[in-house]
Each structure stands twice: as structure tokens, then as C-alpha cells.
Image: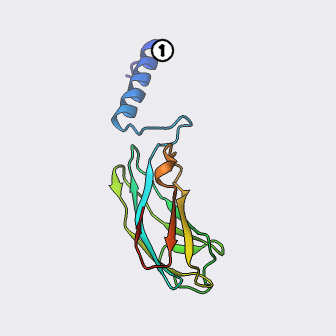
Amino acid sequence: MRRVLPVSVSVSVAVFAAVAAGAAGAVPAAAGGAPEADLAYHGVVSMTGGRVDLRLVPRNHGPSAVPDATVRLLWSAPLVDGQALPQGCARSGARVVLCRVGALAADDVGRPIGLRVRLRGAPSEVVLETDTAWSGGAVDRNRLNDRQRVLVLDTGDEYYF
């Protein structure tokens, strides 16, 4: 025989169960209900004879995991056409390369991204800008550490950001 609880008891049990389930697997959420993460990109870049070498390490400072992310690399000079890019990277315009970062757990470092590109006309300097193109739906309230702007001179010197 099935026992029926009064409505007030069953609603209280349902609310308690929902709160307990939410607390057990709590994922910090931003105001719109999306998880909140803090993506950052740090690396080193150098240029010699119009060839730019870039090593970039993505990081998620949390508090939530990011299911997938993509970093945008914007150059102030156009890239030479027909270049081979590493797996997970693709051209998105004359001056833009997008690279898949992938999933990042909270307080985790992603796999390093290494990229070598050639610029048209071998300029004496170039500005590299990085930012997050896609964060898998996570909200990043601290955009200062994923948006970088680096002046790179054609000297072979390494510039850290």
C-alpha cells in the first residue's frame, strides 16, 4: 500500500532534496545562471624576418570548469596565405587565427599551444592581441587576463605576457 504525505510535507521534502542535490554538486553560477570561470593566456612571442613564434598556455582560474574554449589570435599585419597551422588551429581571416583550447577544469592549466606564422611583407614590428573567442557558455568577469596586447619587434627577442 502506498502512503500519501500531506502536500506541505511533500513540498518541503522536494525543496530539501533539490537544495541538498544542488549543494552537493554546486557549480558557481553567474547572474544569468551560466557557470563562472576565469580564463587567462600567458606565453612568449618572438619575431625574426617576418616569422613569428608563439607559445601560449591557457589557464582557468575557476571557480567552475570550462567545457570547451577557443582563443583568438589577432595580428596587426596580415599572414602569408597557405601556411600549415597546428592541429586545432584555423585561419579566420587575413589577420586572425583561432585555436581550440579544449576543456579546462577549475584551477587547471591547459595544453600549451605552439604556433609559427609568417607575416606578409616581413614588417619590423607587429602587435599580437589575444582573447577568448568561445568559453563553452561560461561567464568570465575578469577579462583583463585573457585579453593581452603585445608589441613584438623583429629582433628575435622574446616578449613574455
Of the pair 12 and 157, the residue shown nearer to us: 157
Colour scheme of the picture: rainbow
Q: Position of residue 41 (x, y in %)?
A: 43, 59
Q: In this rendering, is residue 112 above or below 25?
A: below
Where's the C terminus, which quadrant? bottom left
Q: Quick one: 115 or 75, which is closer to the camera?
A: 75
Residue behind mark 1:
7
Picture layout, residue 64 above or below residue 100: above
Q: Position of residue 69 (x, y in %)?
A: 49, 59
* In the displayed structure image, the side of residue 161 where residue 90 appears, left or right: right
Asked if one can make out residue 55 in the rendered structure from this viewpoint, the answer is no
Residue at 51%, 85% (x, y): give it: 49
Question: Which quadrant would residue 118 be assigned to in this image?
Answer: bottom right
**Foreground residue among 72 and 45:** 45
Is 61 drawn above or below residue 109 in the view shown? above
Visible in this render: residue 161? yes
Judge whether 90 appears above or below 80 on screen.
Answer: above
Q: Nearer the viewer, residue 111 or 160?
A: 160
Q: Could you tell me residue 110's position as x and y percent?
A: 37, 62
Q: Secondary structure at mark 1?
A: helix
Crowd class of label 1 (few under 14; some 14 to 19; many from 20; radius 10 Å): few
For image coordinates 51% across by 54% down, the residue present is 135
Q: Residue at x 37, y 22 (%)?
A: 1
- Check disc 1 and give the amino acid type: Val
